[in-house]
Amino acid sequence: MTVIIQEESTGCGIASVANIVDQSYAEVKAKANAMNIFAGDDTLYSDTQYVRNLLRKYDVQVSSNEIPFKSWEALPDIALLSIKYHEKNGLFFWHWVVFKREQGVSVVLDSAAYLKKNKRIDFQNMKPKWFIEVSKT
């Protein structure tokens, strides 16, 4: 399982979609840009509809609402998580990451370029606020 790294400092949403659909950052970015979704737009990481719409373009089903995070064990096999959740000037922001569970092994795919390891299992260090359930068809 290779982790797609975000190529822009604000490209975590695009990279998370790339990690879910197993395509390159450039391919997903091109599709996003064609939909008027750009990494530099603050709303990409303060509004969930952009990433939902992009996933739907890849025929990926996503839950229609954000589900409060309760525990790592309670997550579905694939989920889009909000971590580093914070408020700035009345707007809420977060960093997108992807949770995956395969054959009972859980990992978080974190696209941040500054990380030494982008396959994260340091669950105690991540504080998800909520998640979006993802179902690949």
Image (cartoon, helix red, strand yellow):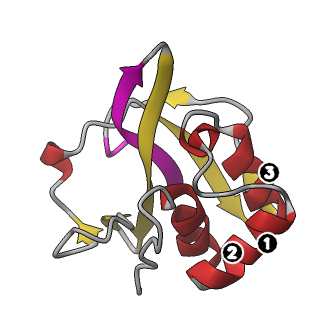
Residue for badge 1: 31
Residue for badge 3: 53
Q: Give the vertical position of 90 relative to 112 (above or below).
A: above
Task: Identify the amino acid type marked 2.
Answer: Val
Mark 1 element type: helix
Q: Are marks 2 and 1 in contact (CB under 8 Å)?
A: yes
Quarter of the image with the C terminus is bottom right
Q: Residues within 10 Å of mark 3 (few under 14, many from 20)?
A: some
Residue 93 x/y as whole percent: 45, 32
Q: Which range of residues does the magenta coloring cover?
A: 72-88
Residue 76 in sight: no
Residue 101 x/y as whole percent: 41, 65
Most common SS among magenta residues: strand
Task: Identify the amino acid type marked 3.
Answer: Asn
Residue 50 in sight: yes
| Mark 2 to mark 1 CA distance (whole Å) | 5 Å
Q: Nearer the viewer, residue 10 or 84?
A: 10
Q: Are marks 1 and 3 in contact (CB under 8 Å)?
A: no
| N-terminal label among 2 and 3 | 2
Is residue 91 left or right of 3 when viewed as pictured?
right
Residue 31 x/y as whole percent: 79, 72
Residue 28 x/y as whole percent: 69, 74
Q: Which mark is residue 110?
A: none
Quarter of the image holding residue 132?
Answer: top right
Q: Give the vertical position of 78 relative to 68 (above or below).
A: below
Q: Is residue 73 magenta?
A: yes
